[in-house]
Structure formats: structure tokens, C-alpha cells
Image (cartoon, coloured by chain):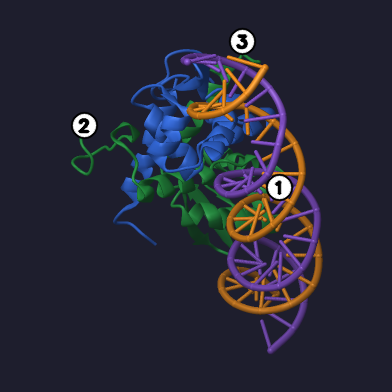
Chain colours: A green, B blue, C purple, D orange
Amino acid sequence: MGHQRGGASASVRDGLDEQSASAVAQVLQGLATPSRLHIISALSEGPLSVGTLATTIGMESSAVSHQLRHLRELGLVTAERQGRSIVYALFDEHVLDIIDQALAHTEHLDGSSS
Amino acid sequence: MGHQRGGASASVRDGLDEQSASAVAQVLQGLATPSRLHIISALSEGPLSVGTLATTIGMESSAVSHQLRHLRELGLVTAERQGRSIVYALFDEHVLDIIDQALAHTEHLDGSSS
DNA sequence: AGGACATCTGAACAACCGTTCACATGTCCT
DNA sequence: AGGACATGTGAACGGTTGTTCAGATGTCCT
């Protein structure tokens, strides 16, 4: 993994053009909220409907729907109609790894606080 | 253990209490901006002063200082006075992995747009 | 067709964020 | 001490964001 645009995996170490920076920022911003993290955490155990999600997390259905739309537009979750419900699922488990790494960072910080 | 974890690390798959969700959201929010991503990208090649950072990225020194403060409070970068300059460095290379994973996600999305 | 249920949508509002500006603080050099 | 350089700080401004509310759309069942 060395060069930009070349192979399978680019790295921030090779530099970030404005386009990539904006794209990465959008994805991370999509995960940078407690409510959306709760949604993704709930979905990590399997697909759930909007209503179930709402009661599980303790949010209004409308709010959940709004956030779900956001996550859907970022390609983080997928939607599938099932009867009168709409069942959402994680696009892939990749997202969970990102969150786990952020979690690891916060744990690694205990002990060197200001 | 799930995937690539080596110790007793927690995972989002085990659920997220409000405290952890808030902490993770803060860290991710700290990376969820093009300007801060540019800063971290520049620092990935080694420590840099505020001024050098500013001219490299094309931001005002004051703006860089503000964002640096943000990153410092999140434990993402460290500061060390060196003469009249203050040299910033990444706290660890962990952060780069998070960004790389987000980058990989955006690339993985090309070709399956909605 | 109707009514009940589930989700989506748009407007509106408060809260937050990143930048700029003006100025303060701190450091080196003569 | 002074002046030049480097960074930090606080207020303020425009833009964005997450939530709520009210209503629209869509689906099932009798």
C-alpha cells in the first residue's frame, strides 16, 4: 500500500485530496452522534424495523426515521420493506470496526487525562 | 472475540451505554471535518508546528490553533513547545486506522450507488 | 372503501460548529 | 527593555444539525 489511486486500499498517509477528505468527513459525521450510534449498535445484532428501533432506543419514530435516512444516504444501512414495516440492516460489519476503534481510543485515554 | 481485537477491548456489539456512546461520538466528531482531517493527514508524516501546518493546508493560523485545541482535548494530538513554535504530533497512529477504514468504506461504495 | 398501523416528509426551532477578527500571551534576539 | 515572531483566546457571525410537530404516503385487514 503505497500510492494513491493505485490499488485496493488507499491510506490517509498518502495525503488527502479535498474530495476524499469531504467524503471521509461525511461518513465519520454519520457516526458522530449518540442517537445514530445507538441505532447502529442495535442493528449490530440483526435487522430491525423503525418502530422496534424507536422503542428499543427510546426515541420518537420520526426522529429515528430521519436519522435512518441519513445513514441510508451514506450507505451505512440498507432498507427493505416487509409488510407494513420497513426493516433496516447494517450495510456491512465494517462500520462496527470503526466504532470499536474509536471505543478503544477512549479506553486507551483513561489515565492520561488533564 | 470478534475480529481483530487482541485484548479485553469492548465492542459496540455488546451494547453502548449512554456514556460510551457520547465518548465515541465525540472522538468521531473530532475527525468528521475536512479541515481536521487535513491536519491529521499532514501530521501523519511527522510532527509539525502550527504555522507550518497552516501554510501546508492553506488555513489561517488562528483557525488551525482552534482545531488543534479541539484535537488536543480529545487526546488525538499532543503538543510540545520548541522554541517559539509549538510542535504538534499524533497521539498515536491509531487514528490513521480509523480514517483509513472510513476511506475504505467510501471506496467500497463506488459502483453500488442508490 | 374504510380505518388502523407504520413510516416518511417538510417546516421550524434551538443548539452546535468552524471560521474570522481583534487582541492577549509567550518566546527569542539585539 | 523593546520589537518581531508564533501561538492562544474570546466574541461574533453564518451555516449546519438533531429534534419535534403536524400531516402526508403507503400497507394491511375486514
The residue type indicated by label 1 comes to Thr
Circle 2: element type: loop
Residue beneath disc 1: A55
Q: Is residue B62 above or below residue A27?
A: above
Kindly identify the residue that appears in the image at 59 percent across and 40 percent down: A37
User: Where does the N terminus of chain A fall, quadrant-wise?
Assistant: top left
- Do labels 2 and 1 touch, CB within 8 Å? no
Judging from the image, mark 1 belongs to the subunit labelled A
Q: Residues within 10 Å of mark 3 (few under 14, many from 20)?
A: few
Q: Is residue A72 above or below residue B77?
A: below
| Sequence-wise first label, 2 or 1 | 2
Mark 2 and mark 3: span between their CA atoms? 35 Å
Residue beneath disc 2: A2
- Residue B20 picture quarter: top right
Q: Where is residue A88 drawn, in percent x and y? A: 52, 52
- Do labels 1 and 3 touch, CB within 8 Å? no
The disc at residue B85 is none
Residue beneath disc 3: A111
| Sequence-wise first label, 1 or 3 | 1
Q: Is residue B34 left or right of residue A114?
A: left
- Residue B49 picture quarter: top left
The residue type indicated by label 3 comes to Gly
Mark 2 and mark 1: span between their CA atoms? 47 Å
Q: Is residue A38 left or right of residue D23?
A: left
Kindly identify the residue that appears in the image at 41 percent across and 38 percent down: B55
Q: Residues within 10 Å of mark 1 (few under 14, many from 20)?
A: few
Q: Is residue B71 left or right of residue D30?
A: left
**Marks 2 and 3 belong to one chain:** yes
Frontmost residue, A22 versus A89? A22
**Marks 2 and 1 belong to one chain:** yes
Frontmost residue, B73 versus C29? C29
> Is residue B99 visible in this depiction of the protein?
yes
